[in-house]
Image (cartoon, rainbow, N blue to C red):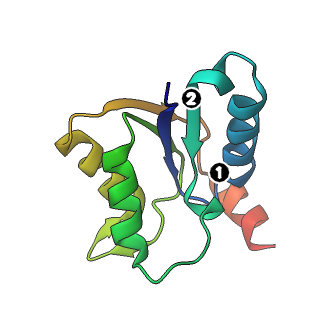
Amino acid sequence: MAKIKIFVSSVQKEFESEREALNEYILSDPLLGRFFEPFLFELLPASGQTPKSVYLREVEESPIYLGLLGVKYGYEDNGVSVTEREFDHATLHHKTRLVYITCLLYTSDAADEEDS
């Protein structure tokens, strides 16, 4: 039985530790690891394909889209972030979409800390 692929989508830099923890948790859990395989773009080896073609193909091949949304919009390609494009592609292909939104508020204090 093939494992069910979960496409993990987020701004990589904002959710770096969460993405890593999620990947490790799924793979190390005896039950989840038996049935699910997370896909994280940053774990792919370099290839001659464009990043956009790779992540859109991976969304198509993954029955489950898991989105982590925070305060950052991320890199924009023609006015749309990669994360939004992945979500739109998952919607277009009728994937199961699970989206988690952080409750953190972006305040001027947080901006001051980020700048230092």
What is the x, y in percent for residue 51? 43, 73
Does dot 2 land on a helix, a strand or a loop?
strand
- Whether 36 is drawn above or below 47: the answer is above
Q: Which residue is mark 2?
A: 36
Q: Which of the 4 image quarters holds residue 104?
A: top right
Does dot 1 land on a helix, a strand or a loop?
loop
Q: Which mark is residue 63?
A: none
Q: Which of the 4 image quarters holds residue 23?
A: top right
Disc 2 to disc 1, C-alpha distance: 20 Å
Horizontal relation, residue 73 to residue 29: left or right: left
Residue at horizontal 49 percent and vertical 37 percent from the top: 6
Horizontal relation, residue 61 to residue 100: left or right: left
Kind of residue at disc 1: Phe
Q: Where the C terminus falls, by quadrant?
A: bottom right
Q: Which residue is mark 1?
A: 15
Residue at horizontal 68 percent and vertical 15 percent from the top: 31
Answer with mark 2 or mark 1, whichever residue precedes in sequence.
1
Can residue 102 be seen from the camera position used here? no
